[in-house]
Image: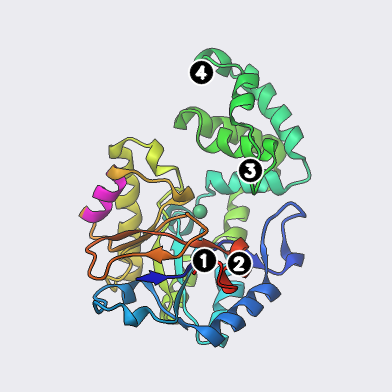
Amino acid sequence: MKLPILMYHYVRPNSERMSERHNVLDFDLFGKQLDVMASKYEFILSNDLLNLDDDGSALKNKIWLTFDDGYRDCIDYVLPSLLKRKATGTFYIPTQAIFERKLLDVNKIHILLSGLVTPKEIVKLADQYFSEAGLEEILNITFNDLFAKFGVANLWNDRETEFIKKLFQKIIPTDIRKKYLASVFDQLVERSESSWVDELYLSPDDVQILVENGMEIGSHGHSHEWLAEMRIDDQRDELTKSFSHLDSAINDGKARSMCCPFGSYNDDTLTLLRNLNVKTGVLNRIETYARFEPGATDLLELDRIDIMFFDKFINGEFD
Ligand SMILES: [Zn+2]
């Protein structure tokens, strides 16, 4: 059986971008994509994948839309567009941002990268703080060596941008890197964290509105960290907190779907998710349909299609 599962992040009018470097899917283009999909497909949600008939006919001409990160875009732009076309989607939310109102490191990095200061200049400042905080001795590597190793351009990012993302989100131990990012962020960004939280994220009430309108909510972790980089106890803590927030907020027993931040997970993650009775999970493999066996007990590793490949998908290149 196969199913297209589409992966969206920021959806807003281009004019509402934080800056020219802020990657968003333009609201008008989103509407056009929905119109095309609505004419070809019926929209389903994760819960429709449980108890499927063996022949898989239930998935014929079906599509599942997913929206990551719990941005206000979901309520301001996505929900009205979906309702207009009688479409549905699953919203994967990082629970610490939404329910504890904390600005996540991933978004501090987006804000830095979307600001007036260029990625090159951010790297320069990061270099300066690196020496000042004595990180070369603590981590036993020079800043230049780190840059040479992790500053590698890819489909989405130039080398400085990719390096900033890795440096502040992944490649150095958590407590050091959180403080390090906070110093660079405070130096370059004047606005308070709480004003960013209100501007960026859905509120708990918005989550209720999504649910009341027939949308599905899933976990995008608690603090949006790389799960595969964490010890199992920290992963357990992260996942347990996230699902207990969802359980108390939604309370219909349905929020049992997972989207691992950055698509990062390992066998420990899968075991923990099974113990938490999580039924479905989506990945970031971005250029393929989800494929699975009828009656599979486990739907925790479903591939998605990144919306940047929408044209390829709709033209049948992934069939
Ligand atoms: Zn995310």
Q: CA distance from mark 1 to mark 3?
A: 22 Å
Dots 2, 1 in contact, CB < 8 A: yes
Q: Considering the image in quadrants, where does the N terminus appear? A: bottom left
Q: Give residue 53's position: percent from left, percent from top.
A: 25, 79
Indicate the amino acid at tag 3. Answer: Asn
Nearest the camera: 121 or 145?
Answer: 145
| Residue underneath mark 2 | 312
Q: SS for tag 3? A: loop
Q: Which mark is residue 94?
A: none
Query: Mark 3: is the Cβ under 8 angstroms from ligand 1?
Result: no
> Quick check: 93 above or below 82?
above
| Residue underneath mark 3 | 154
Nearest the camera: 45 or 211?
Answer: 45
Position of residue 274 in the picture relative to residue 146 (left or right): left
Say which of marks 1 and 3 sits in front: 1
Asked where in the image residue 309 lies, by quadrant, the reply is bottom right
Q: First in sequence, mark 1 or 4: give its number.
A: 4
Q: SS for tag 4? A: helix
| Residue underneath mark 1 | 318
Indicate the amino acid at tag 2. Answer: Lys
Q: Which residues, given as a range, are shown in magenta? A: 268-274
Asked where in the image residue 81 lies, by quadrant, the reply is bottom right
> Quick check: 97 above or below 312?
above
Q: SS for tag 1? A: loop
Indicate the amino acid at tag 4. Answer: Leu
